[in-house]
Amino acid sequence: MDIANKRGVLLLFGIMACGITVADTSVKLPEPKEGQYVHQAPTLEDLEKDESLKPQLKAVIRKGYDLFMNTQQLRGENVFNDMNCRTCHMGEGRKMWAAPVWPASTTLPDFRGKNQHVNSVEERIAGCFAFSMNGKPPAYGSDTMLALVAYQQWMAKGAPVYETNIAGRGFGKLEKPKLEPDYGRGEAVFSENCSVCHGDKGQGQKNAEGTVVFPPLWGDGAYNWGAGMTRIFTAAAFIKHNMPLGQPGKLSDQDAWDVAYFINAQERPQDPRFVGSAEATREKFLNFHKHTLYGTKVNGRVLGAHTNTGEKPFLKPDNLKPRTFEQGSDSW
């Protein structure tokens, strides 16, 4: 049994221990469309068998894997919430429809709408630290960043460069729901399907040693208002294709949209791009926030109308900045 399958067995026992009944573990995911590139990302077992790689490189790739799976070891330095890279990028970063990370190594540098400039692989990783992990990205060129890039690039071995028609990339997409997403319906879906792992207040669960078992979905331990998962369509697709854990596809599309709305109608740490008010920040970054509830009124309160940065003792990481390639653009 390979490493991934062993973890799968242990995860299943963990699910059962939490009281979840997995009635149907059959995978109900979209089929690759005709003409899409399907990549079989290599595993750590493949890494050990590969005699073409120098042992020093293998050691760095293994370190990247370790950081990817347990990013909490950087808690208080680069990570200030309860997230790991694998929280969103499931299956060791290899799983289709769970944001496999290897495509970043074959499609970047490229323009990214979120920050309106051309991004490198390192910068893409930096965004995950700044938003999803409510933290401070490792320095570009640092040992930590090199290890994470090496792991991602290893998984891209054999994949064509700049092929963008990739099967299973990101979280997939859902058709717009027949009914507008609804807070009350989403709360009911959450209570029935999600709270057993993520807590009735979205707080997540930790074991006796304090290790995060199931991540929080809102509050100080969750992703902040700038994270991609705050977009309702992103969360809905992730939920549909990956949740409840071990039962992908169990929820209807409408249920996925509704529960994504409910989860993202809860408070979380401030967007690091905050400019003084939630409404002004929403307007400035409307290309992103038009898909979120940030800066809008839900249940009588404006979401994001606070200065709370969670455990993080700062707002914006100093190495998260725009790039224009114009003279002086690196000195602001």
Image (tube, grey):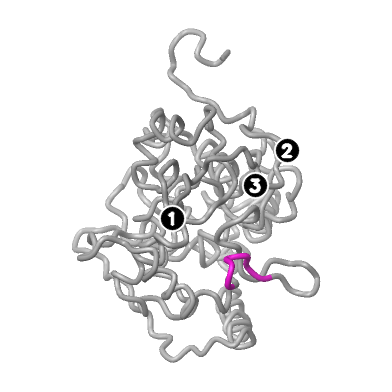
Separation of marks 1 and 3 at Cα, in angstroms = 44 Å
| Callout in the foreground (1, 3) | 1
Q: Secondary structure at mark 2?
A: loop
* Snapshot quadrant of residue 62: bottom right
Camera-nearest residue between 312 and 98: 312
Q: Secondary structure at mark 1?
A: loop
| Callout in the foreground (2, 1) | 1
Instruction: Determine which residue is flagged by label 3.
Output: 147
Is 71 in the magenta? no
Sequence-earlier tag: 2 or 1: 1
Which residue range is magenta in the image?
200-205
Tell me, for residue 26, which label it has, or none.
none
> In the displayed structure, does residue 66 sit left or right of residue 36?
right
Give how far across and how far down residue 104 sits, in percent: 44, 46
Q: Which quadrant of the rendered structure holds the N terminus? A: bottom right
**In the depicted structure, whether residue 72 falls above or below residue 329:** below
Tell me, for residue 299, which label it has, or none.
1
* Snapshot quadrant of residue 66: bottom right
